[in-house]
Image (spheres, rainbow, N blue to C red):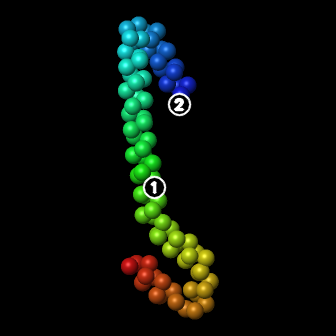
Amino acid sequence: MVYQAIAVIIVAVIVVKWILLLLPLLIYISAKLYTSSIRSIRETTRVESLTKSPLLSFFGETFNGTSTIRTFKRSTDFIKKNNQ
């Protein structure tokens, strides 16, 4: 994607010469937006992984314990808990 961005910038400069004057400002604004958004993205990813963690661990335990659930004939209890 970096090479594509560079190619677009080069073509834009060749076609419209005055874009070269705006290029430093556009690069500065892009860098600021990137640095401010990367913090938010990291925090969102962290919160999302924390919220999904109980559900994923429940499914993992269930898949590992399927034979035990069937052996003790507790599948109806499991289905009720899963629906809950």
Residue that appears at 51% across and 86% down: 75
Residue that appears at 50% across and 68% down: 56
Q: Secondary structure at mark 2?
A: loop
Residue 18: x and y in percent read 37, 8
Residue that appears at 48% across and 83% down: 78
> Mark 1 or mark 2, which has the lower sequence index?
2
The amino acid pointed to by label 1 is Arg
Residue projecting furthest to the top: 17
Residue 58: x and y in percent read 50, 74
Residue 4: x and y in percent read 52, 25
Real-space Cα separation, disc 1 to disc 2, in angstroms: 26 Å
Q: Which numbered disc covers residue 1? A: 2
* Mark 1 Cα-neighbour bin, 10 Å: few <14, some 14–19, many ≥20: few
User: In the image, is residue 11 above or below residue 54?
Assistant: above
The amino acid pointed to by label 2 is Met
Tell me if I can see residue 59 in this picture. Answer: yes
* Mark 2 Cα-neighbour bin, 10 Å: few <14, some 14–19, many ≥20: few
Residue projecting furthest to the bottom: 72
Q: Secondary structure at mark 1?
A: helix
User: Which residue position is annotated with label 1?
Assistant: 46
Which of 17 and 37 lies nearest the eye of the viewer?
Answer: 37
